């Protein structure tokens, strides 16, 4: 079954229900939004898009973001959501690797880049061409989306790796349906009176969470600023009510700081789902003290989106249970759609409370990595998703994360992989060696720190290297701190000792 059928059915049953707002202003009702989606699907088909073809979306949050996604799904095509914070050159690589037939971009002016892939047609979200494509044509409200198999691809999400280029995570229609259904079991009921708010990027988990709300006919809200602004959220909570949104822990800290200053107690917010980085116990307790029991934690990866473990609102707020602190400090227990275990290096189950790699198996686990058979075989070895994260399971089944393998840096809820940054810096003529680590930042979680060794006789400072990075990668990945060394510490095999670098930091 095509998951776009949920929009189709809701439009038939609730045609006059508000579907999308920008702030408080109505953008479209469900009948009109489905018509807009069908019009885009017809336009995409006229451009050669068919079942299995890729439609990429490289733009900030927008009231037509979901229409583009559903138009691709309507045809049986695959949506490729690209992080809007990426550098255009990085985005072009994803377009080429995915084989995107169409790319909907913010301004429609990237196809002039030399890196733009041949055979990919660009449409600007704000262009006359897009407006014409989205204009309603002949109304055929009875024709549903193209039928697909549950194992057919729906979503190709690019997640960065530590050993080179990003990998495309292949998620099927069945994966997405299981994710959405499990949300209503474990996270929160999806209600027609809800206002799901897209304050976090729609290219990631916030966008994935649209499906269950489409199904029940809730009204999706794009903030006027198209991003996270605590003042906007407070205003919309007061005027709309029933806000439900995803936020990284760094966003929650900013929201709490704003509320403490303004006196707001969270009225109008129904649920905040948090994840994407470590939530420290003191921060969670302060959030609950400020807003009350409105917080639900989820732990997941692109390879099992939003659906590895869950800590429901009553447990996130509970301080009376004998193990309340341990529970609140965990990432919860296994979602209803998956099994979770912790294994040692030989693949055997670890003893209770002993650390090991977190393994996951279930209906939301990806089909594999696009065009990466070796990486797929390694990550899905034995039928389990090997997350690369280290954790421990207690006797009640609560999972506590103890470390992140592969040295991933999480800043503002976004993963930054040191190798990507290191490779850019090593391409500079003055740089002989480089090693990148994360260091604590009270607001963003972590900052990027680069240890740099220059070639003998070369002189290059932070300003020049920052400009070099600015031209080649997304701004959030650039190092915020620099240390220049004569040599990097290494072991007998020549491997850089990042543990020693962290001690120096």
Image: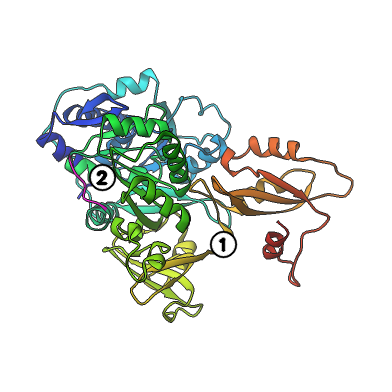
Corner quadrant of residue 392: bottom left
Question: Earlier along the polypeptide chain: callout 2 or callout 1?
Answer: 2
Closer to the camera in the image, 505 or 432: 505
- Tell me how the rendering is colored: rainbow
Boundaries of the magenta span = 188-192
Q: Position of residue 196 (x, y in %)?
A: 29, 39
Q: Is residue 70 left or right of residue 388?
A: left
Q: Which residue is drawn at 86% across and 44% down?
A: 458
Does residue 365 show up?
no
**Badge number at residue 406:** 1
**Badge number at residue 211:** 2
Q: Which residue lies furthest to the top in this view?
A: 128
Q: Where is residue 493 in the image (x, y as percent from the top left)?
A: 73, 71
Q: Distance between the residues labelled 2 and 1?
A: 32 Å
- Does dot 2 land on a helix, a strand or a loop? helix
Closer to the camera in the image, 216 or 24: 24
Corner quadrant of residue 129: top left
Closer to the camera in the image, 190 or 373: 190
For label 2, the crowd category at 10 Å Cα-Cα, with few meaning under 14, some 14 to 19 and many 20 or more, is many
Q: Which residue lies furthest to the right in this view?
A: 457
Quarter of the image containing the C terminus?
bottom right
Residue 387 vertical position relative to residue 284 in the rendered view, above or below: below
- Does dot 1 land on a helix, a strand or a loop? helix
Q: Position of residue 93 (x, y in %)?
A: 53, 42
Q: Is residue 16 left or right of residue 68?
A: left
Q: Does the magenta stretch include residue 41?
A: no
Q: Residue at x 48, y 48 (%)?
A: 413
For label 1, the crowd category at 10 Å Cα-Cα, with few meaning under 14, some 14 to 19 and many 20 or more, is some
Q: Position of residue 49 (x, y in %)?
A: 33, 36
Residue 450 vertical position relative to residue 254 in the rendered view, above or below: below
Q: Is the magenta stretch mostly helix, strand or loop?
A: loop
């Amino acid at each position: 079954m095509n998951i776009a059928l949920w929009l189709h059915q809701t439009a038939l049953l609730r045609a006059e229900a508000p579907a999308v707002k920008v702030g408080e202003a109505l953008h479209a009702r469900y009948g009109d939004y489905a018509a807009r989606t069908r019009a885009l699907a017809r336009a995409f088909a006229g451009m050669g898009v068919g079942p299995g073809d890729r439609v990429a979306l490289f733009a900030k949050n927008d009231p037509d973001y979901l229409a583009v996604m559903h138009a691709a799904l309507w045809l049986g095509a695959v949506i490729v959501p690209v992080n809007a914070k990426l550098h255009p050159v990085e985005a072009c690589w994803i377009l080429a690797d995915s084989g995107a037939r169409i790319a909907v971009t913010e301004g429609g002016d990237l196809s002039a880049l030399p890196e733009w892939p041949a055979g990919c047609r660009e449409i600007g979200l704000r262009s006359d061409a897009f407006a014409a494509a989205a204009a309603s044509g002949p109304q055929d409200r009875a024709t549903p989306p193209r039928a697909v198999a549950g194992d057919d691809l729906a979503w190709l999400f690019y997640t960065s790796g530590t050993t080179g280029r990003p990998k495309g995570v292949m998620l099927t229609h069945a994966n997405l349906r299981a994710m959405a259904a499990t949300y209503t079991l474990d996270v929160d009921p999806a209600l027609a009176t809800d206002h799901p708010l897209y304050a976090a990027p729609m290219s990631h988990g916030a966008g994935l969470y649209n499906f269950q709300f489409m199904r029940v006919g809730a009204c999706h809200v794009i903030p006027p600023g198209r991003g996270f602004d605590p003042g906007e959220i407070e205003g919309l909570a007061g005027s709309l009510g029933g806000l439900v949104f995803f936020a990284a822990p760094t966003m929650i800290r900013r929201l709490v700081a704003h509320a403490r200053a303004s006196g707001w107690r969270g009225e109008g917010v129904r649920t905040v789902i948090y994840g994407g980085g470590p939530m420290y116990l003191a921060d969670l307790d302060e959030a609950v003290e400020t807003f009350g029991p409105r917080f639900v934690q989820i732990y997941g990866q692109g390879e099992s989106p939003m659906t590895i473990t869950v800590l429901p609102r009553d447990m996130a707020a509970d301080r009376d249970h004998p193990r309340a602190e341990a529970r609140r400090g965990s990432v919860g227990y296994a979602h209803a759609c998956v099994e979770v275990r912790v294994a040692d290096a030989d693949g055997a189950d670890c003893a209770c409370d002993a650390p090991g790699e977190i393994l996951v198996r279930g209906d939301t686990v990806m089909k594999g990595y696009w065009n990466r058979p070796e990486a797929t075989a390694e990550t899905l070895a034995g039928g389990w998703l090997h997350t690369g994260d280290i954790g421990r399971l207690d006797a009640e089944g609560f999972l506590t994360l103890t470390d992140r393998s592969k040295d991933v840096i999480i800043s503002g809820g976004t993963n930054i992989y040191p190798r990507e940054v290191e490779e850019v810096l090593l391409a500079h003529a003055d740089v002989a060696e480089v090693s990148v680590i994360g260091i604590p930042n009270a607001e963003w979680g972590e900052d990027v720190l680069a240890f740099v060794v220059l070639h003998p006789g070369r002189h290059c400072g932070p300003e020049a290297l920052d400009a070099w990075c600015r031209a080649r990668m997304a701004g959030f990945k650039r190092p915020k701190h620099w240390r220049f060394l004569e040599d990097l510490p290494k072991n007998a095999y020549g491997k850089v000792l990042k543990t020693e670098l962290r001690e120096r930091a």
